[in-house]
Image (tube, helix red, strand yellow):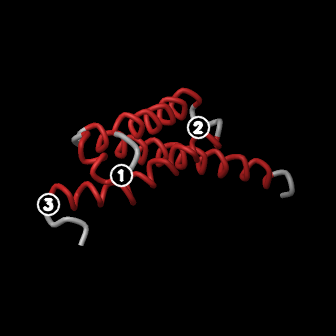
Amino acid sequence: MATAAPIFFLDVRYYIDVIIYIVSLAVQAVALIHCLTQRGNGFQALGTLPKGAWAGIIGVCLALTALTGGRLLIISMIGVAAALVYMLDVRPGLKDLSDGKGFW
């Protein structure tokens, strides 16, 4: 009974790592696609980083996450953090600009 616990632990850890890897790739890919499909002048109107900077940061982190297979967890976490900052901060501002409603 005592020898079954480490084997079970390794299986659970493997599946959790795979789930984190897939979610990380998905979040970064969605943010990169959204960034690439937006106009560049909207980023300037918001006063944030330019479109190329956002695309570069998210794209490099996505590529490193995909190439390392999620083994460098810190790169995956930085990529997810950058993608979430983009999706939760920049994306709503771009949406407000494109709707014509402004920031209010």
- 3D distance between C-alphas at marks 3 and 2: 37 Å
Q: Give the residue drawn at x 65%, y 36%.
A: 72
Toward the bottom, the furthest residue is 104
* Position of residue 69 measured from the top left corner of the image (x, y, whole percent): 57, 32
* Position of residue 23 measured from the top left corner of the image (x, y, whole percent): 47, 48
Q: Which residue bears the numbered disc 3? A: 99
Find numbered disc 2 in the image and state the secondary structure of the residue it sits on: loop
Residue 47 shows which numbered tag?
A: 1
- Give the vertical position of 58 relative to 102 (above or below): above
Q: Which residue bears the numbered disc 2? A: 70
Q: Quadrant of the C terminus?
A: bottom left
In front: 41, or 98? 41
In front: 18, or 59? 59
Toward the left, the furthest residue is 100
Q: Amino acid at mark 1?
A: Gly
Find numbered disc 1 in the image and state the secondary structure of the residue it sits on: loop
Q: Amino acid at mark 3?
A: Asp
Find numbered disc 3 in the image and state the secondary structure of the residue it sits on: helix
